[in-house]
Image (cartoon, rainbow, N blue to C red):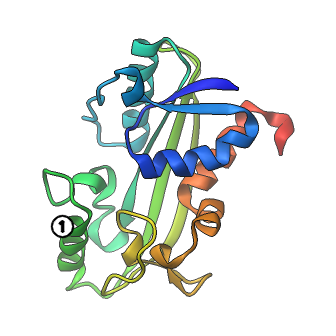
Amino acid sequence: MKRLVLASNNAKKLKELDAILAPLGWELIPQGELGVDEAEEPHVTFVENALAKARHAARITGLPALADDSGLCVEALGGAPGVYSARYAGEPKSDARNNEKLLAELAPHANRAAHFVSLIVFVRHADDPQPVIAEGEWHGQIVAEERGAGGFGYDPLFFVAEFGCTAAELDAATKNGVSHRARALQALVERIHPSRH
Protein backbone atom coordinates (compact mmCIF):
# COMPACT_ATOMS: atom_id res chain seq x y z
CA MET A 1 0.00 0.00 0.00
CA LYS A 2 1.22 3.47 -0.88
CA ARG A 3 0.82 5.86 2.08
CA LEU A 4 -0.82 9.17 1.34
CA VAL A 5 -1.77 11.88 3.81
CA LEU A 6 -5.27 13.30 3.45
CA ALA A 7 -5.28 17.02 4.22
CA SER A 8 -8.57 16.81 6.12
CA ASN A 9 -9.94 15.55 9.43
CA ASN A 10 -13.46 15.07 8.04
CA ALA A 11 -14.30 11.42 8.82
CA LYS A 12 -17.09 11.26 6.21
CA LYS A 13 -14.85 12.71 3.52
CA LEU A 14 -12.12 10.20 4.45
CA LYS A 15 -14.56 7.30 4.15
CA GLU A 16 -15.80 8.52 0.74
CA LEU A 17 -12.27 9.01 -0.65
CA ASP A 18 -10.94 5.81 0.88
CA ALA A 19 -13.67 3.72 -0.79
CA ILE A 20 -12.46 4.95 -4.17
CA LEU A 21 -8.68 4.93 -3.55
CA ALA A 22 -8.17 1.73 -1.52
CA PRO A 23 -8.60 -0.57 -4.57
CA LEU A 24 -5.70 1.31 -6.22
CA GLY A 25 -3.38 0.35 -3.37
CA TRP A 26 -3.38 3.74 -1.65
CA GLU A 27 -3.68 3.97 2.11
CA LEU A 28 -5.17 7.31 3.11
CA ILE A 29 -4.08 8.63 6.48
CA PRO A 30 -5.98 11.61 7.90
CA GLN A 31 -3.61 14.46 8.75
CA GLY A 32 -4.79 14.58 12.38
CA GLU A 33 -3.32 11.09 12.99
CA LEU A 34 0.06 12.49 11.93
CA GLY A 35 -0.16 15.59 14.12
CA VAL A 36 -0.91 17.99 11.26
CA ASP A 37 -3.06 20.99 12.17
CA GLU A 38 -5.63 22.42 9.75
CA ALA A 39 -4.13 24.69 7.10
CA GLU A 40 -5.33 28.24 6.58
CA GLU A 41 -7.80 28.55 3.70
CA PRO A 42 -7.70 32.27 2.92
CA HIS A 43 -8.29 32.01 -0.81
CA VAL A 44 -11.39 32.79 -2.88
CA THR A 45 -10.99 29.79 -5.21
CA PHE A 46 -11.26 26.06 -4.55
CA VAL A 47 -7.99 25.30 -6.36
CA GLU A 48 -5.88 27.71 -4.27
CA ASN A 49 -7.33 26.40 -1.01
CA ALA A 50 -6.81 22.75 -2.02
CA LEU A 51 -3.19 23.48 -3.02
CA ALA A 52 -2.52 25.27 0.28
CA LYS A 53 -3.91 22.31 2.25
CA ALA A 54 -2.01 19.67 0.25
CA ARG A 55 1.34 21.50 0.46
CA HIS A 56 0.87 22.11 4.21
CA ALA A 57 0.20 18.41 4.94
CA ALA A 58 3.07 17.24 2.70
CA ARG A 59 5.52 19.71 4.25
CA ILE A 60 4.82 18.56 7.81
CA THR A 61 4.65 14.79 7.14
CA GLY A 62 7.13 14.33 4.29
CA LEU A 63 4.50 12.15 2.56
CA PRO A 64 2.64 12.70 -0.71
CA ALA A 65 -0.61 14.50 0.06
CA LEU A 66 -4.14 14.69 -1.25
CA ALA A 67 -6.44 17.62 -0.55
CA ASP A 68 -10.00 18.28 -1.58
CA ASP A 69 -11.65 21.67 -1.46
CA SER A 70 -15.30 21.47 -2.27
CA GLY A 71 -18.51 23.34 -1.87
CA LEU A 72 -21.90 24.23 -3.18
CA CYS A 73 -22.36 26.95 -5.81
CA VAL A 74 -25.88 28.31 -6.20
CA GLU A 75 -26.64 30.18 -9.43
CA ALA A 76 -29.12 32.68 -7.99
CA LEU A 77 -26.64 33.60 -5.24
CA GLY A 78 -23.78 34.37 -7.64
CA GLY A 79 -21.97 31.13 -6.82
CA ALA A 80 -22.34 31.43 -3.04
CA PRO A 81 -21.74 29.79 -0.63
CA GLY A 82 -18.78 28.54 -2.76
CA VAL A 83 -15.50 28.26 -0.84
CA TYR A 84 -17.35 29.36 2.32
CA SER A 85 -19.75 26.38 2.18
CA ALA A 86 -18.58 24.76 5.43
CA ARG A 87 -18.79 28.02 7.39
CA TYR A 88 -21.62 29.76 5.51
CA ALA A 89 -23.51 30.57 8.72
CA GLY A 90 -20.29 31.39 10.62
CA GLU A 91 -18.39 29.64 13.40
CA PRO A 92 -18.65 27.07 14.80
CA LYS A 93 -19.32 25.01 11.66
CA SER A 94 -22.89 23.74 11.57
CA ASP A 95 -24.61 21.87 8.72
CA ALA A 96 -28.03 22.70 10.20
CA ARG A 97 -27.36 26.45 10.41
CA ASN A 98 -25.75 26.48 6.94
CA ASN A 99 -28.83 24.80 5.46
CA GLU A 100 -31.16 27.25 7.25
CA LYS A 101 -29.19 30.22 5.92
CA LEU A 102 -29.16 28.81 2.38
CA LEU A 103 -32.95 28.35 2.38
CA ALA A 104 -33.46 31.87 3.75
CA GLU A 105 -31.17 33.44 1.13
CA LEU A 106 -32.83 31.48 -1.68
CA ALA A 107 -36.42 32.20 -0.57
CA PRO A 108 -36.97 35.18 -2.92
CA HIS A 109 -35.49 33.39 -5.95
CA ALA A 110 -37.28 31.19 -8.49
CA ASN A 111 -34.02 29.80 -9.90
CA ARG A 112 -32.99 26.86 -7.68
CA ALA A 113 -30.15 25.55 -9.89
CA ALA A 114 -26.99 24.61 -8.02
CA HIS A 115 -23.92 22.43 -8.37
CA PHE A 116 -21.39 20.90 -6.06
CA VAL A 117 -17.74 21.41 -6.98
CA SER A 118 -14.82 19.27 -5.85
CA LEU A 119 -11.28 20.33 -6.58
CA ILE A 120 -8.74 17.63 -5.70
CA VAL A 121 -5.02 18.26 -5.62
CA PHE A 122 -2.29 15.63 -5.34
CA VAL A 123 1.28 16.67 -4.52
CA ARG A 124 4.19 14.23 -4.56
CA HIS A 125 6.02 16.48 -2.06
CA ALA A 126 5.49 19.95 -0.56
CA ASP A 127 7.33 21.81 -3.34
CA ASP A 128 5.98 19.70 -6.21
CA PRO A 129 6.20 22.01 -9.26
CA GLN A 130 3.53 20.01 -11.09
CA PRO A 131 0.70 19.18 -8.71
CA VAL A 132 -1.98 16.98 -10.24
CA ILE A 133 -5.26 18.90 -10.23
CA ALA A 134 -8.68 17.47 -11.02
CA GLU A 135 -12.15 18.94 -10.83
CA GLY A 136 -15.61 17.44 -10.65
CA GLU A 137 -19.10 18.95 -10.72
CA TRP A 138 -22.49 17.54 -9.75
CA HIS A 139 -25.56 19.46 -10.91
CA GLY A 140 -28.95 19.62 -9.24
CA GLN A 141 -31.57 21.87 -7.65
CA ILE A 142 -32.10 23.14 -4.12
CA VAL A 143 -35.37 21.88 -2.62
CA ALA A 144 -37.47 23.86 -0.12
CA GLU A 145 -36.94 21.50 2.82
CA GLU A 146 -34.45 18.86 3.94
CA ARG A 147 -35.03 15.28 2.79
CA GLY A 148 -33.05 12.16 3.70
CA ALA A 149 -30.71 11.19 6.51
CA GLY A 150 -27.60 10.15 4.56
CA GLY A 151 -24.63 12.18 3.43
CA PHE A 152 -23.63 15.42 5.09
CA GLY A 153 -23.56 19.18 4.55
CA TYR A 154 -26.07 20.36 1.96
CA ASP A 155 -26.95 16.82 0.78
CA PRO A 156 -30.51 16.89 2.26
CA LEU A 157 -31.32 20.00 0.15
CA PHE A 158 -29.60 18.93 -3.09
CA PHE A 159 -32.11 17.30 -5.46
CA VAL A 160 -30.70 15.13 -8.24
CA ALA A 161 -33.19 14.80 -11.12
CA GLU A 162 -31.46 11.68 -12.48
CA PHE A 163 -32.40 9.76 -9.31
CA GLY A 164 -35.54 11.70 -8.34
CA CYS A 165 -34.28 12.28 -4.81
CA THR A 166 -31.86 14.34 -2.74
CA ALA A 167 -28.20 13.41 -2.30
CA ALA A 168 -29.03 12.52 1.33
CA GLU A 169 -31.57 9.93 0.10
CA LEU A 170 -29.01 8.09 -2.05
CA ASP A 171 -27.17 5.09 -0.65
CA ALA A 172 -23.45 5.66 -0.10
CA ALA A 173 -22.33 3.39 -2.96
CA THR A 174 -24.50 5.22 -5.51
CA LYS A 175 -23.42 8.63 -4.22
CA ASN A 176 -19.74 7.59 -4.32
CA GLY A 177 -20.17 6.70 -7.98
CA VAL A 178 -21.76 9.94 -9.18
CA SER A 179 -20.85 12.77 -6.80
CA HIS A 180 -18.63 15.75 -7.58
CA ARG A 181 -15.91 14.18 -5.41
CA ALA A 182 -16.18 10.85 -7.25
CA ARG A 183 -15.88 12.61 -10.61
CA ALA A 184 -12.86 14.65 -9.49
CA LEU A 185 -11.18 11.54 -8.03
CA GLN A 186 -11.78 9.53 -11.19
CA ALA A 187 -10.19 12.33 -13.23
CA LEU A 188 -7.28 12.47 -10.77
CA VAL A 189 -6.71 8.70 -10.90
CA GLU A 190 -6.70 8.82 -14.71
CA ARG A 191 -3.97 11.46 -14.59
CA ILE A 192 -1.85 9.61 -12.06
CA HIS A 193 -2.48 6.11 -13.45
CA PRO A 194 -3.24 6.65 -17.17
CA SER A 195 -3.47 2.91 -17.76
CA ARG A 196 -6.31 2.51 -15.24
CA HIS A 197 -9.24 3.82 -17.29
- On the question of residue 2 being in view, the answer is yes
Which quarter of the rendering shows the N terminus? top right
Secondary structure at badge 1 equals helix
Give the residue at mark 1.
97
Image spot of residue 176 (x, y percent) = 61, 60
Residue 171 higher or lower than 88, as above or below = below
Residue at screen point 28% across, 60% down: 81
The quadrant where residue 195 appears:
top right
Left or right, residue 56 beside residue 4: left
Nearer-the-camera pick, 174 or 143: 174
Image spot of residue 186 (x, y percent) = 68, 48
The residue most toward the left is: 91
Residue 78 higher or lower than 58, as above or below = below
Image spot of residue 168 (x, y percent) = 46, 74
The quadrant where residue 146 appears:
bottom left
Residue 145 higher or lower than 10, as above or below = below
Three-letter code for the amino acid on which mark 1 is drawn: Arg
